[in-house]
Image (spheres, rainbow, N blue to C red):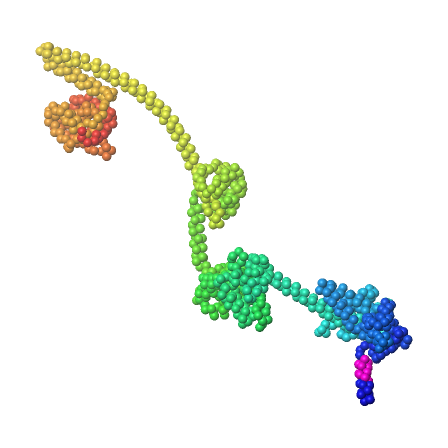
Amino acid sequence: MGRARDQVTAVHESEERYRRLVENLPFSIHEIDPNGRPIPMNPAGSSVVTFIENADRDALYYLAAATDRDRERLRSCLAGAHSGRTTYLDFETPDHQILQASFVPLMDDDGNVHRVMAVAHNITARKQTEQFLELENSLLADFTRGMPLEKALTRLVEFIELQAEDVIASVLLLDAAGTHVQHVAAANLPEEYTAAIDGAAIGESTGSCGTAAYRGEPVFVADIDTDPLWDAYRGLAQPHGLRACWSTPIKTTTGRVLGTIALYRREPGMPKAYHRKLITAATNLASMFLTQYDNEQHLRESERLFRTIFEQAAVGVAQLDTVSGEILHVNQRYCDILGSIPEKLIGETWMALTHPGDLDEDLANMERLRRGEIREFSIEKRLRRNDGEFVWIDLTVSATWQAGDEPSTHIAIVSDITERKRTEEQLQFTKFSVDSCSTAIFWIRPDATFLHVNDAALKQLGYSRDEMLSMAVSDIDPAYPAEVWPEYWARMRRERKLTFETSIKLKDGSSLPVEITTSLFERGGEEFVFAFVTDITERRRVERQLRQSRQQLRQVLDTNPATIFVKDRTSRILLANRAMADFYQLPVDEVEGKTHLELHAAYGGRQQEVERWLSDDRRVIENGEVLEIEETGIDRQGKLRHFQTIKCPLELENGERAVLIVSHDITNRKEAEEALRRSEEQLRELNASLDRRVAEQTAELRDSNAELSAFAHTVSHDLRAPLRAMEGFAAALSEDYGDKLDQDGHDFIQHIIDSANRMDTLVNDLLSYSRLGRAELRVGRVDLQAIVDEALHQLAADIKTCQADIEIIGKLPIVMGHKATLVQVAANLISNGIKFVPAGVPPQLRIWSEQRPDGMIRLWIEDHGIGIDDAYQTRVFQVFERLHGIESYPGTGIGLAIVARVCERLGGRCGVESKVGQGSRFWVEFPAGGGRP
Ligand code: ADP
């Protein structure tokens, strides 16, 4: 019995345990009777399936479904359970609960279904969550596909309205400032209403949404008609029948309000549980979505930003594999610096691109980076460009892996510093030049004090640097006192650069003439004047000298009678002397600067003339040749003037070629030449006529000479026969009739004989003289010595008679002549010498020869006779010229005429030097005949 009772107790306990379990399960458990009526088996059974409680007790279980379709399914599930199968169904109740139900048949011992249990599990929340998740997923998917925010939120609104058919949903977003709402999505609110709301300010009592956004907490208004929060907006809501509005702020995780979600109803009332759940879920989703959107937006923006920074960076950026050194990614600038393209650079190692000289330093730094000793380093180095040249870059390398992790990649930022390197180099040169240049340099502040001076400035002025830096400009240049300084500075700012000459005061009190070039320069908003000071003492001196020498040159030019000027390519007169200016009757400075064409036109010169000159100029300028020409021009008086002109090329300072013209006015010379030419012409004509006349006269003379000669010959010849007859008959008379004649008779006969003899001598002399005029004389080398000897021999008798003393001095030379006639000459002269002496005085003769400077040989015959008066010394050489009577000195007066004619015929000369009472010295000259034969 005890055992049975134990068993009963055990069953009881077990039943109790199950009952408690069932009663506490979150399921509704009903027993369904064969008519389909539900009998609640646990408290949840009545609470979960509320309709059964609310409806009449006889309501059937299948009425728990909201739709006809679900009711039909429920009935068939119940029927299935009654026939012994366990069936399942998810369905929605009229109050929008979703139940997951299972219908289980309970069998009796015979295996018949005697009861059916319905176990319903309320899965509304889970379902809703699932649906929201689904929506969320789909929205996120849409969003990542780039669905605009407005469309996504509209879908949310539609979803809410699908979930709760009795509400109209709307989403408002706050503007960037967080002070005004913007309408975003409300598919079923009247457009007029949303338009009115759009842009409204948030605040206390600005309707449900404005207030909720303002407060940052939900504002559920049960009746818009009465709630004071709607006072300002009631007028907008009422015409559209909007009565309740439950608004909840959408916030970020940090609590910032992004917008609101509102549920409107056309009936007053507060949200029910499922409304609240819907609001919570929708708000969460919107919040998550908006936050995500916000982040995404940020991310996208920052991604765009970073991409832009990377791509558009002014510096080259590359991502490299830290271990292999390979380039993984480069931006455009990096490519530009290396003159390459990404395709070429990617996969290349930085080591291969680095200049061998810079590799070690870079490798050492990279090693430290890899070991984690440093996270970043910067160096300057050279990279090889695509064209093989090296470019100087500034490199900053930063590790991208987390500290402590294995090295992965690093970022290299490079900037082209070739220009900077060059500038640095130039700067070094400049600095060196400035410091060491011999020109004084000052940097001057706007207040006229010195910011800096170079060594040359100190040396030039004699101050120490400290002294200079404590001084102002007016201390060294009194021309710039403090009161004029601002004016100077203003001018400096206007013109930026000034050059002027002034005198500066040195420390020793002396002053130095200088040229100052100042330039204004700005740095970091401050202005300085940079002044170059050049000592121009030497320049001044040179200028003075130059001025002097220019004046001298000017003088030389101006006093020169020639026209001297320089023209450039355009015929502009660069320099002209006074003669040139005088030609145009202008001052020199009005000639200089004008073109030759202008000058010439102004004075009315002929165009043709100047064009000829200019074409010559062009030849000189273009070919560089020197022209020497004669030109003509008409002067202001209209007179034709002649010029002897030299045009030569002249290099100007600017490298241009000009033409230097020196022109002599040769008009006078030309005219004189012309006159000379004319008179020469006349003279030539005169000469010609003279020659003609001379020839005629000569011919006449020759004829008459010949006639005369023939006549003389005939006469002489014919005279001799009667003479000889006279002499013969006189002699016969004396011989035959001498004894019959007295002394007078004999004297007469003797007279006749003498006269005949004289006549004969005369005729002989005449004959030989006339022969000399005609005879052909063969000139040859003749020994004067032999000639004189021969003459002395011929005269030997006379010499002996008168006891003449004849001395020949020296050896006589050879001459060119004709022997016989020369003997005649010598004999004539010697016979005169011994003849013309005072009576009773024995003659003394000296004979010698003299070599004349003109190559002639002169033979002198000197006596101490009676001499010849000066008046007769030339006449004695003429025919029949005798100075004495026959009685005192016999002769014919032909001897010297023969001497003169012989000399003339042989190309010699003759003459006499004599003084009356002292003697005479006759001489004859013949061309020298050279050495002795
Ligand atoms: P002639 O001796 O026959 O008179 P010449 O012709 O030889 O003729 O000389 C001319 C004249 O010159 C002489 O009559 C004489 O008066 C003068 N005469 C010539 N030789 C001398 C001389 N040696 N001394 C002086 N008178 C001279």
Q: Which residue lies at the image location 23% right of the left edge and 30% below the top edge?
A: 927
Q: Which residue lies at the image location 17% right of the left edge and 13% below the top edge?
A: 724
Residue 917 visible in the picture: no
Quarter of image, res 167: bottom right
Q: From the viewer's perspective, is residue 632 above or below residue 710? A: below
Closer to the camera in the image, 642 or 155: 155
> Which image quarter is the C terminus in?
top left
Q: Is residue 619 left or right of residue 872?
A: right
Quarter of image, res 162: bottom right
Q: Is residue 490 left or right of residue 788?
A: right
Q: How many marks?
A: 0
**Residue furthest out toward the bottom:** 2
Residue 423 spot, x, y in % from top left: 52, 61
Secondary structure predominantly adopted by residues drawn in magenta: helix
Q: Which residue lies at the image location 50% right of the left edge and 66% below the top edge?
A: 361
Residue 53 spot, x, y in % from top left: 87, 77
Q: Is residue 600 magenta?
A: no
Closer to the camera in the image, 648 or 866: 648
Q: Which residue lies at the image location 51% right of the left edge and 68% below the top edge?
A: 364
> Which image quarter is the N terminus in?
bottom right
Closer to the camera in the image, 234 or 886: 234
Residue 723 spot, x, y in % from top left: 18, 14
**Residue furthest out toward the left:** 739
Q: Is residue 18 magenta?
A: yes
Residue 618 visible in the picture: yes
Span shown in magenta: 11-23
Residue 313 spot, x, y in % from top left: 60, 62
Closer to the camera in the image, 202 or 666: 202
